[in-house]
Amino acid sequence: MALDGFRAAVYQGNLTDAISNVQQRTPESFNSHTLHIAITGESGSGKSSLINTMRGLCAGDEGAAETGMLDTMTMPVAYQDPVLPGVTLWDLPGVGTPYFPLNTYCEALNLSQYDFFIIVGSQRFRSDHARLVREIQRMGKRFYFVRSKADMDLDASRRQRPSSYNEERILKQIREDCRRGVAAEGVGHPPVFVVSSWEPNRYDFPLLRQTLQMELPRLKRHAFLLSLPAVASPIINQKKAAPKGEIWKIALFSCLLAAIPVPGLAFLGTFFIFRKHLSRYYIIFGVDDRSLSALARQIGKSVLELTAVMKSLGITAMMALKLLLDSVGTAVMVAEYSSERRPVSGAMVSGGVVLVTTSFMLRKRLASVADDTWRVLSKALEAERENAI
């Protein structure tokens, strides 16, 4: 299977090999993947008409998307692109309708399930467009902005100022207005197309189709990379569950040490055991210093950029000591105090405290390292997406 190599590398704790597996894939290997394109925008902007035009259909043709001024859609509708292989166009309900108000639109329609977006607007770049752009960027996905109904704008300008009418100048002004609006949301080079669904051979519609066809392999690869953190998550969780059985054995050994009536032995023993196994967790998951350095070279980033997303404290002796002083240390000192007053019961209390606290801290750090592994891998895949743009 196509993802077997990636999954195996993640499970083995070799994130460098996991990324290498992705980098070595040819553009042709993504042909079998389906790209789900969401056509969104305000109600009445011409979303359904654009889909019909992209499919070579007119309103009323068999299989055509339903068009009309009143947007009564309550569910997204899928249409296959007849020209572009492996492309599904999704006609989404309009943003800002009574069914889908602006403040709940993104969540209600679960926009994260789509790979790419075409935002359609029939007027100036508006606040609902900005909200969509911000949400799409937050998901790390890409979009085109399509300014529809160009024929209506040109007709209005021709009637209002017939003597100074200049089609190219007006179209340029519309494009620049849209680009400024999109760029204000932090998009460096906003892709903007001015179209008319009534005249598909004019304006930017041919360029829209040409651009989408040319970028299709790259867009499919981008969507594939976005899907990989979800692929890796259950594998990392499986790895996280595997050492839990041995944690009780480690905790039991610490418990036996704590039962020995030697002052400080329980704390020191627990400290060295904790440090040893915490270091081992970083190695097992592939986020130790050596592995991170190799991964950083693989993706062309610095180690600091990878460690910046890690929330666990690292594996230095001082950090491990601090963790134990904050949690295990206090409990052990209380238990050792009890053992001085009542040796037998004190030893039992000391052992029980160390057993529970050692097990708890090791589980906690194991979960933290596993979460960091997912974050580091996601950051590396994000770098791969940036390199491909």
Image (cartoon, rainbow, N blue to C red):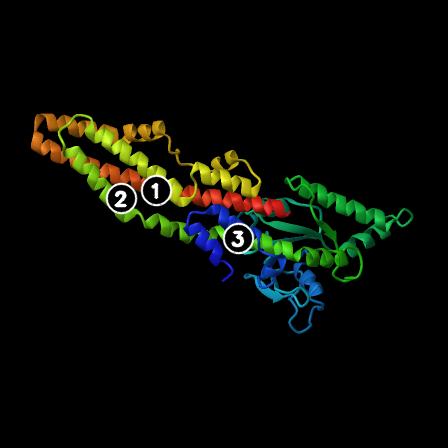
Tag shown at residue 50: none
Q: Amino acid at mark 2?
A: Ile
Q: Amino acid at mark 3?
A: Asn
Residue 305 x/y as whole percent: 52, 36
Q: Amino acid at mark 1?
A: Leu
- Which residue matches tag 1? 366
Label 2, secondary structure: give it. Answer: helix
| Residue depicted at x 16% and y 37% | 256
- Which residue matches tag 3? 21
Is residue 9 or residue 381 the one in the foreground?
9
- Residue 285 visible in this rendered orientation of the protein: yes
3 or 1: mark nearer the eye = 3
Label 3, secondary structure: give it. Answer: helix
Label 2 CA crowd tier, 10 Å (few <14, some 14–19, many 20+): many
Quarter occupied by residue 205: bottom right
Tag shown at residue 247: 2
Q: Is residue 101 left or right of residue 363?
A: right
Farthest-out residue, bottom: 62
3 or 2: mark nearer the eye = 3
Is residue 330 or residue 381 the one in the foreground?
381
Is residue 365 or residue 178 the one in the foreground?
365
